[in-house]
Image (cartoon, rainbow, N blue to C red):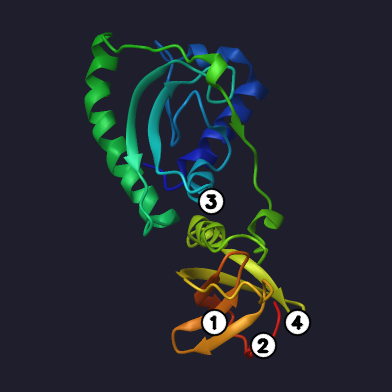
Amino acid sequence: MDRWPEARSHLLFRLVSTLGTELLGIPPGRTPFFHPAALPSNRGRHPIIWALALGLAETTSTFFLLDEGADSGDIVSQTSVATHEEDDAGTLYEKITAAAVSQVQEFIPKLIDGSMARVTQDQSKTNYWRQRSIADGRIDWRMSNSAIHNLVRALTRPYLGAHFDYKDEQVRVWRTEVVEDHRSHLEPGLVIGVDSQGLTVMTDDGAIRLVEIEPPVRIKVDEYL
């Protein structure tokens, strides 16, 4: 199975749009394709990233029949995949992959003998996740500590990482920990701790510890990010 199937799905959709619907008629019964979200909800781009960034409690491994639309074909297999606080982009992908392999083993024989069930997507339940940009990965310290933590785990390796700017340098954040800190009189973005455990920064509702950043930067307590 390809490493990041959601990107491949949209490349194929663009190919279909370019070459025309004749391409869809080549395989009998059309081709099952993969989208790691709960279709008909959450169509569109970067479903693994969005699921973590939005703090969803679960996502879904979905196989559907490719058609002229974007993630709009009949569903042939779906299974829920729980997301936990310790999950990040890498671990969630591995969980989705394991679920997808099991699904393929179940529905391929049915595809071959023609008994595979098809469920038409309910268009009234549709929404689309948009394409993300570099700006979406920039940390705003006025966000809640949980929102920043979710953003970092959504964009960690193998993605490009969440980031903040420090003295005209872009600093990547690969791992964070939420810190309970109720000093509400301190402004978001204020560095309140620098030690062997990381860099602790005030947020809108507490603080967050930046456990792994790149490149290493010398930031002092009482500086603002």
Q: What residue is drawn where x is 53% and y is 47%?
A: 54
Residue 10 position within the rendered picture, expressed as x and y whole percent measured from the top left: 57, 34
**Sequence-wise first label, 4 or 3:** 3
Q: What residue is drawn where x is 50% and y is 75%?
A: 209
Q: Are marks 1 and 3 in contact (CB under 8 Å)?
A: no
Relative vertical location of residue 93 with respect to residue 33 in this rendering, above or below:
below
Q: Quadrant of residue 200?
A: bottom right
Relative vertical location of residue 19 with respect to residue 185 in this rendering, above or below:
above
Mark carried by residue 167: 4
Q: Nearer the viewer, residue 102 or 153?
A: 153
**Sequence-wise first label, 4 or 1:** 4
Mark carried by residue 179: none
Residue 85 falls left or right of residue 136: left
Q: CA distance from mark 2 to mark 3?
A: 28 Å
Q: CA distance from mark 2 to mark 1?
A: 11 Å
- Amino acid carrying label 4: it is Lys
- Residue of label 2: 222
- Amino acid carrying label 3: it is Ala
Mark 3 residue element? helix
Q: Is residue 32 visible?
A: no
**Sequence-wise first label, 2 or 3:** 3
Residue 30 position within the rendered picture, expressed as x and y whole percent measured from the top left: 43, 15
**Sequence-wise first label, 1 or 3:** 3
- Amino acid carrying label 2: it is Asp
Mark carried by residue 53: 3
Q: What residue is drawn where x is 64% and y is 58%?
A: 137
- Residue of label 1: 199
